[in-house]
Image: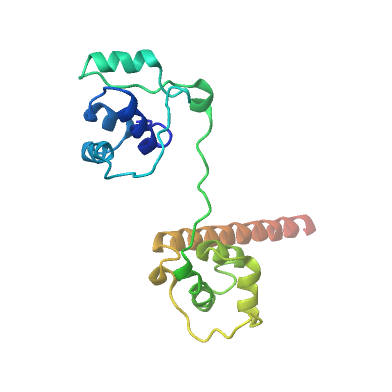
Amino acid sequence: MKLPLMPKATAIWLIDNTSLSFDQISEFCGLHELEVQGIADGEVAVGMRGYDPVDNKQLTKEEIVRCESDPKARLKLISSEVIDSLPPRKKDSKYTPLSLRQEKPYAIFWLIKRYPDDELSSSQIAKLTGSTKNTVEAIRNGTFREAILEAKSPMDTGLCTFQDLEKALNRAKNKKDRQEAAEAKAKLLAETESN
């Protein structure tokens, strides 16, 4: 089910400017009915400004009037062919909280120790830990700005999941298998041409 932009702000506007029931507003905004009641009582979203869904082309006045006259009716978003035809958004880069950023070098060191360069590349390690390839290379070469003496699992520190690591290892193994198959094929082809 599609929800309006800024659901709480939209709920504030609907509470202030319409006679819709809390149930109708909660259903439309994707909020719990008690949360909508808390917004109406001034306990939730204090200081937040309302967001007009009519001016922002998410609802029509006719739709609001229709639902005000029938308490069982449900509000429907205006559908836009342009928005509906857009491809899904790519996953954003992973945000690492400040408390975990200091753990990155230890996690990189752990991955380097456990999985040599032929198993996990520097770019894969950088992607798993949310770091940069240059940092991984510096730790691998021993030129990192501070000495890394202990290793911590990136799964234990929360930088990646076991499934992420397993996917990266499988990708690396498949790539290695393809390279070996291509080399064997090239060698076989060279032998047949020389005969």
Q: What residue sits 34% from the left and 45% below the top?
A: 46
Q: Foreground residue, 126 or 15?
A: 15
Which quadrant would the N terminus be assigned to in this image? top left
Q: Is residue 39 left or right of residue 134?
A: left
Q: Position of residue 193 (x, y in %)?
A: 77, 55
133 in relation to 72, above or below? below
30 in relation to 109, above or below? above
Q: Is residue 136 left or right of residue 81?
A: right
Q: What residue sits 64% from the left and 73% below the top?
A: 137
Instruction: Using the rendered view, name the quadrant where residue 72 is placed.
Output: top left
Q: Position of residue 182 (x, y in %)?
A: 65, 56
128 in relation to 68, above or below? below
Q: Foreground residue, 186 or 139?
A: 139
* Image label count: 0
Q: Foreground residue, 159 or 62?
A: 62
Q: Position of residue 161 (x, y in %)?
A: 41, 62
Instruction: Using the rendered view, name the quadrant where residue 63 is placed.
Output: top left
Which quadrant would the C terminus be assigned to in this image? bottom right
Q: Position of residue 31 (x, y in %)?
A: 29, 38
Q: What residue sits 51% from the left and 27% below the top?
A: 83
